[in-house]
Amino acid sequence: MDEVGRFIDRSNTNAEKYTLRQKLFGTDEVTPMWVADMDLATPACVLNALKERLEHPVMGYEIMKRSGFEAQCAWVKSHHGLEISPEWLSYSPSVVASIGCAIRAFSEEGDEVIVQSPVYPPFYDMVRINKRTLLLNPLHRDREGMYRFDLDDLRSKITPKTKLLLLCSPHNPVGRVWSPEELRALGEVCLEHGIRIVSDEIHCDIVYPPHKHTPFASLSPELFASTVTLMGPGKTFNMAGFSISTVCIGDERMRDLFNHERMRVHFGDGAALSHVAFESAYRDGGTWHRELMLHLGVNRSMMAAWCASIPPISHYSPEGSYLAWLDCRSLGLGDRQLREFFAREAGLGLSAGLGFGKEGSGFMRLNFAVSSAILEEALEKIENALQRSGYV
């Protein structure tokens, strides 16, 4: 059985979060807790399946096996109550690639695409790179720190050129797991104006009780016919390095439009080892995933208790994902100063909130998918830095 929470030293690998420390933070002497992969071992069932595949000496072109798609369908039905068909699924190298493909498939240059800020930075990039117009519909943050959709703002901004909404569900970086009622209200606005939805649900399996992920396409037949759902094993099983995800489109006409664009840019079918890893994770990774969620739950509780004891830094405990959205505005630092404080004074490399949109100014994102010992050490470093600087 996997020991999910054990420490894994990645410093001598080509891991992005480690190799880019000097470039991003000006020093290699930081504990990197920024990019959203885990410093936890990928499931043994996946690694064992890969070893078995490597017993065969030929690594040529391969296509996704139907059994791989079937394994994902069974996982989605078991964990999220949504019954999908393998025929609705197609391979993609990443959620970001899928977003770009969907933007081109369902809109024209100059059309408007809704982005709900603050949000994962490639949402903005894909809109701009594809020469669409960014329509910002910022999330509303209430007095308790919970983020909500601002539907009045959305209605006031929609025009006849508004064609798509990019939804992040569960949300990165603010950690919301949207309720069915919230999603349904958002969907009604979209249906009223003929807006299609591209729903990034890559964090759907990292959700803490009592919260439950609701697939956007499951809300009604009308939303089912207007939604592109993006999923994959990258976050769930720490498999980002395999560059494999899926696009789920139940409506045949929308699927044809997407597949035409998919063929035009030639996504292909992925790599042999990625196929093996994908199927093994969804078929055999259930026990590992349950252990992962127990470990992340411990770290999440540690984050919440620590923030409650450190007045200058607060956060709304994430309902989903392994990302803590830290409100550091009480420190009174500019965004550059804030980033340097964490890197230079606390020895931590975090994601600057401003990178997620102007609404992220004064915030920092911390990835707590590490061993509990590393997280405890990181929090101690922040607290010591705050004390030395006179903030506590």
Image: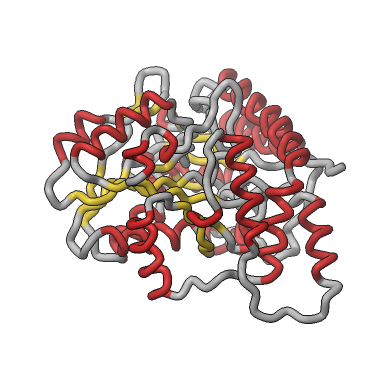
Q: How far across and how far down the image is residue 206, in percent? A: 60, 37
Instruction: Name which residue lies at 24% across and 30% down.
Output: 151
In the foreground, 150 or 99: 99
Label tally: 0
Left or right: 312, with 29 as reference point: left
Q: Which residue is at a point 35% across and 60% down the rendered structure image? A: 126
Is residue 212 found left or right of 75 in the rendered image?
left
Which residue lies at the image location 83% right of the left edge and 65% below the top edge? 51
Quadrant containing the N terminus in the rendered view:
top right
Q: Is residue 286 above or below residue 313?
A: below
Where does the image place residue 369, in percent across and percent down from the top left?
66, 41
Q: Nearer the viewer, residue 45 or 298?
A: 45
Q: Is residue 81 above or below residue 68?
A: above
Instruction: Identify the residue at image location x=52%, y=32%.
Output: 213
Instruction: Using residue 221 as the reference point, say whether residue 54 is left or right of it.
Output: right
Q: Residue 384 location in percent, x, y? A: 64, 32
Q: Position of residue 205 (x, y in %)?
A: 60, 39
